[in-house]
Amino acid sequence: MANCCLERPPHLDFPPTWTLNSGLCTLPLLHCPPTRPKPARHSQTQDFMEALYAKHSTLGVDEVGRMLINDVPLPRWLVSAQIKCILADSDAWTASTIEQPLMCAPGLVDVLSSSTPPELDFFTTLPQPPRKKQWGIYILLLTRKDSKPRLYIGSGTHAQDSVQHRANGYFSGKGPFSRHTQKALDEGYEVSSFGLLCWIDLPPPEQLLRQRARFLVLEAVLAIHFNACRETIIDQLYIGDFYIWERSTVAWDALCGHLSITERVAANIHLSEAELKAAAVAHTERGRQKTERYRKRKRDADETEFLAHGLAVHQAWYYVTVIDAPGHRDFIKNMITGTSQADCAILIIAAGTGEFEAGISKDGQTREHALLAYTLGVKQLIVAINKMDTTKWSEARFGEIIKETANFIKKVGYNPKTVPFVPISGFNGDNMIDVSSNCPWYKGWEKETKTKTTGKTLLEAIDAIDQPARPSDKPLRLPLQDVYKIGGIGTVPVGRVETGVIKAGMVVTFAPAGVTTEVKSVEMHHEQLVEGAPGDNVGFNVKNVSVKEIRRGNVAGDSKNDPPKGCDSFNAQVIVLNHPGQVGAGYAPVLDCHTAHIACKFSELLEKIDRRTGKSIEDQPKFIKSGDAAIVKMIPSKPMCVEAFTEYPPLGRFAVRDMRQTVAVVAKSTNTGGKVTKAAVKAGAKK
């Protein structure tokens, strides 16, 4: 191992005026009131820094794919998405093969422990120039007269090219700039210094090309009663996991998650209490104002993840896209769309007196959300019991809620022993990211699967989600979440890959539109992908297709490998849950399947079956009622794409909605044909 030129620092007392940034987050160092303890996250940062400055530094990776320096995991804000993909490939990188020299710039400790900006020659004292095929961590110092300096940390996949290219761009003012850097420059900051801190060797290019499919992307849906404060919980996930959530002039400090909302705002935003309350009311309002502002903010940020209408939590070995499913009864259609894309449901329950009881009543939304999640194929569940601060953290109330909740989720189909129950306060952040001291009686949650897992916080419960099976060997199925027309690029459909893979050059067919065309490129989270794998929320560019020809609810598939097709009718196994009367032929509710919502008529009741064994009880019944199961011939009001549940489960489960009282599972379907574009014909001829 190579020796670094730095002595191990006696302490790491960073000045509160400096800010580290990874392109994903803004992280003020030690920006906490002196009377409060340091946030738990900072200890990991200190460990990393101390390991980085040690005389002998070794690089490795642990069994779950986290990068290690001297056996200390890198903080998530220092690891780029591409490096995380590299480390996730256990065939390419193992702990025994990644002991490579780590080169560090001398004087780094002095820079980070001083309030004086470094001199330019600090950045030119590297022990030796990096080679092209190396990955480096670089820093950028921005200064402005009469303002606090900002120190940003980023990473480049080719260290030498990255440093030279970025340095020229920064000092010339031509860029390219990250979103955060551009924002600072717009505010009047200037580039003071730029340089490389350290670098490591990259694996061969052919290994880099297959990393994307190896890296796991999880979807978690927030299934929340409309009074359970979901926006507050989402804020805490952003704040605690180093994200900035901006609301007009409100900028939330990423390291002040241990403060209450009022204290956090008073300390960092300089708003009056009245202005704070007005902002909170506007944010939680269910009307058009809130929705439009929310969507506009996400579009302005140019984030692919806004298509899931949620946020992304970048964990040690997962990208967790949290889908913000609406909790109000009037928006249940959107809740079903979000749930159909999820690997895990986070059921948020309000602990307040009367609120919990209303949610689990016969017509309650908590019960309904759990049932819909299980019916739509979400087999992993986390239960977060919110508003525990309103019960004064009552252990008795927590136990009562667990008992009642365990009973009804067991009836739905979940095994309570595999479900973590976490007491939280979204308003104060208790047990969201860090363990709260307000509930000393709470010993933590326990999850019994193949291996026993324990933890205390909601974030730890998300970390403990079992890796879902990804059917990449099946033909492609990609339900469209939306379709965009982007100037200079063309038509860009977006959605989640359910089965198979999608890649540039593939000829795809959209059903039931019947349009066939060629895929030009595939992207996710600002990265161009070699291929999109199951679980990825991707956007892909197609040519010669208008946004009017394809729409949300269509399904994309490989035109040469069992392409999807629209159906005019299909047979479905229907379980009537809570209908007030009888259901017979001619009944016409709304069918919610993947991202499609279409009115559908019960054309014929073929047979009544035993809902447990599936055996036939009665042929051609005249009607069915609550509690009955039957095979029904269904005719949609317009063609739609559904598949046999046994072949493509994500497209074979759906809810039949008439005040959300029936749920169905598809048994089989019939198909139709469609249109082929010129691009598809040319692509097919090449092959």
Image (cartoon, helix red, strand yellow):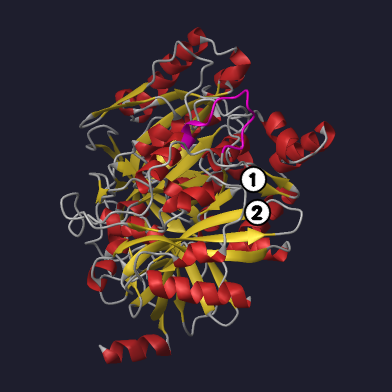
The mark nearer the N terminus, 1 or 2, is 1
What secondary structure prevails in the magenta region? Answer: loop
Category of crowding for the residue at label 1, using alpha-carbon neighbours closer than 10 angstroms: few (below 14), some (14–19), many (at least 20): some
Taking 60 as reference, is 575 left or right? right
What distance separates the C-alpha of mark 1 from that of mark 2? Answer: 7 Å
The residue type indicated by label 1 comes to Thr
The x, y position of residue 11, in whole percent, is 46, 36
In this rendering, is residue 131 above or below 396? below
Residue 586 in view here: no
Residue 281: quarter of image? top right
Q: Are marks 1 and 2 in contact (CB under 8 Å)?
A: yes
Image height of 556 relative to 597, above or below: below
Residue position marked by numbered label 1 in the rendering: 17
Residue 38 among those drawn in magenta: yes
Quadrant of residue 393 in the image? top right
The residue to which callout 2 is attached is 149
Q: Does the image show residue 236?
A: yes
**Magenta region:** 30-42
* Of the pair 391 and 436, the residue shown nearer to us: 436
Q: Secondary structure at mark 2?
A: loop
